[in-house]
Amino acid sequence: MEDYDYLFKIVLIGNAGVGKTCLVRRFTQGLFPPGQGATIGVDFMIKTVEIKGEKVKLQIWDTAGQERFRSITQSYYRSANALILTYDITCEDSFRCLPEWLKEIEQYANNQVVTILVGNKIDLAEKREVLRQRAEDFAEAQNMLYLETSAKESDNVEKLFLDLACELIREAKQNKLDNNDTAPMPGEGKTISYLSCCSLN
Amino acid sequence: MAAEDLPSEFDVVILGTGLAESVVAAACARVGQRVLHLDRRSYYAANWASFTFNGLLTWIQQHQESQVEEEIKDWSNLLEKGEGLIYLSNPESTSIRNLQVFCFTSDEDEEEAQSPDSPNTTEEKAVYESEERSETKSAGLNEEETKEKPEEASDKEEKEQAAQREALEPAADKPHPSAAQSQSEPTQKNISYAHLVKEGRRFNIDLVSKLMYSHGSLVDLLIKSNVSRYAEFKNVTRILTYRHNNVEQVPCSRADVFASRQLSVVEKRKLMRFLTSCVEETEDQQAYNGRPYLEFLHDQQLGDNLQHFLLHSIAMVTEDTPTEQGLAATRHFLRCLGRYGNTPFLFPVYGLGEIPQCFCRMCAVFGGIYCLRHSVHCLLVDKNTNRCKAVIDSRGQRISCSHFVVEDGYVGEDRKVDTPPRFLSRAVLITDRSILPSDSDQQTFYFNIYLTDSLPISPQVSVVTVPPIAEGCPVVKMVELCSSTMTCIPGTYLVHLTCQSVGSAYDDLSPVVTRCFHTPDSPDQDRRPSVRWCLYFNMADGSGVEVEGHNLPSNVYVCSGPDADLGHEHAIKQAKSIFHKILPEEDFCPPAPNPEDIIYDGENTSATGDEDKDGEKTKDEAGEDKEKLEEQSIQTEE
């Protein structure tokens, strides 16, 4: 038996350079990697948190740089429980691209995915290009949660992932109540390793 | 999203994101090569791709439009001394042809269609994509657009896009008798075309139809490399065959054999004895080398039933396949049986188009750079060494590389080894029920399709072998997918037919479709599944394409497109051979470290390391990873 009550897959998307990797590393490792440079060989990071006495394992997936030329594979979105759509509050362009990202989410992610919009880099307040109100309005219109963070100063990073975890637990419990035998949704299939566990030869 | 420039130096540049190219990309990046992976298309996986329903409509439209030849720009100003140019061509112009679409859905909304008395339910309409509608070109297809053409109620329109040389024929009106069709399906809901479009994103329709052999080279590679973590799989649950105008289940596992109702006790005993005996190679078998497998089977005195099952459904070979090949295929089948389930096959959830993408993800995780909608226009060749030194991309940037891997469609015909071009015939059908409803399917069949979700059904994924239905007809392989594979919506089945082309896809496959399914062309109405929508097309057969030997520089390797085989052996073998030509000393796709095993140094100690850029050390001893993989079960059902 694994030592957790829930396992959720969280996927980060958004333009290159908005600080996706920094958010993950701040949360999972408590550090802010200075300078650029893709993280070679790391698929996803893991952190187990405890919420109201329940152990929640968060598997956080990064884009592996495929967003740079807008070439994220569809399979990246599959079976994600939550999406963190990130933009940079000091970069108007990264905000303006959000509708494109939403289109991609609608196309490939599953219907029940929880999406949260994150405006990162609030430590650079003097360079802000996207007003908070504007982002909040946008998030509300799109039915998303909204949060502003600083991976550098560690502002709201913990809160971001813990809020998401709470929301996912709430949804998971709701789903169980609504429908014991849910329609085939992502996660229906099995990983090869799981399949092989079942076989005898 | 900004038009950032690509770096100008790589070890390996790969053009095309088909399966073989993607595996090469992952393998190269995994061992530290700097990889640039491009595709001219806006989607991954080239001819291995899968599409939503709407995405497929767009794809069809793109292929029906007359291809505008791209202007060949003169890049000779970028040449350095002693260099020559080789221009590449457009892959889409040659590999897909003879597209034909038929739609047999009612346009009535569901409430009306539910009433069996409604005269409207008898109407069959064909909606087709037409060239004239060029205004929809880039917008994709939405509901209004696709409903633009519903013609007279009982008319069926047929759009024939003939081979490229043919001029565009006007749509031929072909009236079909459509009387009294409602009688066959009294309580059934017709799925409207609008519904297919509306729910279009829940379809994942593959251009190729293959299955993964449980012990095949693809599954082995997915496990070895840890790429399997990016996908989920389902067991193929049944093997069926078409025989005497009927679809029958083929018993192949021990449990199946004993449970079978079609087989007599004597047959069961004979089959078990045969299956046990053929695992070992015997002298008796060797005596048949070079002679047809059918002859061997015949001499085993198995009887017609068993002979049919063994030849067509287990070995999946033809009547004149030599015995040694037939036996090898039978052994492969048996080896794969029982590893994961009752049949030797797996199918990836969301369709086969996921698999190349999974390898691309692995490549990207190891630093590979990805760029769709981006191509290579020409190669710069050093005249002295006959090696490709660099490529010119579609933006006119010179990118140097040590090796260039390319999908065969980009290579001009004039440079290829002279092999007669072969084609596959493909059909894709959306049907309303399984070709062989299981008991529980039959129970739920009469319920509203939207309720079936919550009823306990045992969804089936079936492979159906169809021997030649007449002299000279091809062997057809059919795969029927249910909605739990995430390739179609509840209440529908997605059926893929494939064969080696004899004529056009329509010529080769429509006779089988007419026999196995209910279409306006079917001779009678019975309980066969109705076809709601179908697509025929031919695709270039990749099985004859060689990796090397073309009139190309020595460091340019050609990857072929999909072949007709059910498994993936060809593409994986090809990828492996290309990888070993590029990097003879390196391991092919060693296991990627498990994220849970990665130990991070607290501090960013160095930024100089090449692989461990961010100061993390990876612990990737193969043995340990294997164990971890076995324990790890990300999704567990039940």
Image (tube, coloured by chain):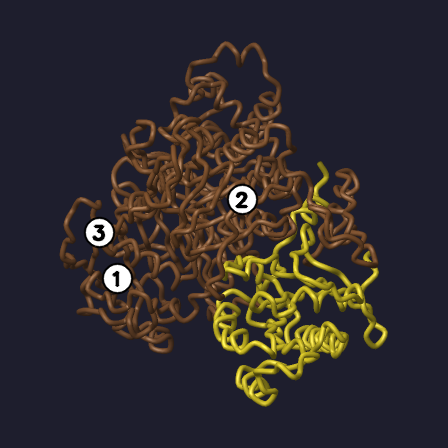
Q: Position of residue B232 (x, y in %)?
A: 61, 53
* B470 vs B334, nearest the viewer: B334
Give the amino acid at mark 1: Glu
For residue B208, side relative to residue B7 (left or right):
left
Element class at badge 3: loop
Location of residue A145 by image quarter: bottom right
* B476 vs B132, nearest the viewer: B132
Q: Name the quarter where the C terminus of chain B is drawn.
A: bottom right
Q: Colour of chain A?
A: yellow
The chain containing the residue under callout 1 comes to B
Q: Residues within 10 Å of mark 1 (few under 14, many from 20)?
A: many
Mark 2, residue position: B10
Q: Position of residue B204 (x, y in %)?
A: 46, 58
Query: Residue farthest to the right?
Result: A53
Give the amino acid at mark 2: Phe
Vertical relation: B492 (above or below) B581: below
Q: If you read the primary sequence from the N terminus, does the residue marked by circle 3 or circle 2 appear first?
A: 2
Mark 3, residue position: B161
Give the amino acid at mark 3: Gln
The chain containing the residue under callout 3 comes to B
Residue B23's disc is none
Mark 1, residue position: B129
Name the residue rendered at 57%, 65% in the picture: A16
Element class at badge 2: loop
Q: Position of residue B235 (x, y in %)?
A: 58, 47
Location of residue B551 by image quarter: top left
Q: Are marks 1 and 3 on the same chain?
A: yes
